[in-house]
Amino acid sequence: QQPVQSPQAVILREGEDAVINCSSSKALYSVHWYRQKHGEAPVFLMILLKGGEQKGHEKISASFNEKKQQSSLYLTASQLSYSGTYFCGLTNAGGTSYGKLTFGQGTILTVHP
Amino acid sequence: DVKVTQSSRYLVKRTGEKVFLECVQDMDHENMFWYRQDPGLGLRLIYFSYDVKMKEKGDIPEGYSVSREKKERFSLILESASTNQTSMYLCASSPPMWDRDNEKLFFGSGTQLSVL
């Protein structure tokens, strides 16, 4: 079952903060975040693993709440370059995913000057 | 840098035609994937392959097949295209288990397929 992302869309001014949530109906093992700019390929941002280890992007952070079966992506002091569609991808089983992810429906983030 | 190349950016086909979508990666990745992207539905996995001549169904395999004759190439086949297969198709690859980036997907830019 696909994870649910919220909000579906968000509009910001440069310098503002945003939070994107990703919720699963199943227990999580890992959460992967990708960003896709208009007309481009999705690009890996970050992975969070069960147990709290986080790897990824230095200017964007994320949390992994195992109990709530939810991950949140935090974009602080947003820049114009942050605009795009953000996807979370989940694995619900143990072990490495090797890219076999179940993605959410995406959150469209627009940053204005 | 890893490069995943999809042969066509835009494709227009007629209902009932057999359609081939080609994907090539240049980083010797073992794992390759086909996702379909639709507004409001995100990315959904169609098929994936962990090795040459190996394939496994993803979440929405109906109406599709795949071919992996060489490590670098992964083809998606629509045996008889239908209008509900109009979509953006994204190919991706990921490194082998021993690579520190083995959890990352590297995507191509996509093929926008329209079936009329």
Image (cartoon, coloured by chain):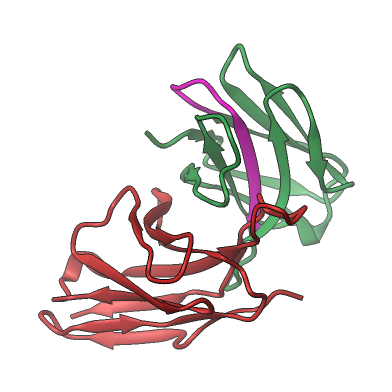
Chain colours: A green, B red
Q: Quadrant of the C terminus of chain B?
A: bottom left
Locate residue A1, reporting x and y percent: 37, 33
* In this rendering, position of residue B27 left or right of residue B79: right
Q: Is residue A87 above or below residue A50?
A: below
Q: Is residue A7 above or below residue A15?
A: above
Please indicate whether residue B20 sits to the left or right of residue B102 in the image. Answer: left
The magenta span reads A23-35
Which sits in the foreground, A73 or A33?
A: A33
- Which residue shows up at 52% across the image and 47% down it? A106
Please provide percent x and percent y for residue A85: 60, 54
Q: Is residue B92 magenta?
A: no
Does residue A16 appear anywhere in the picture? no
Which residue is located at x 64 percent, y 59 percent?
B96
Question: Residue lying farthest left?
Answer: B16
Answer left or right for B31 relative to B52.
right
Relative to A87, does residue A65 appear above or below in the rendering? above
Task: Tell me the residue at 47%/84% (across/down).
Answer: B9
Q: Is residue A81 above or below residue B76?
A: above
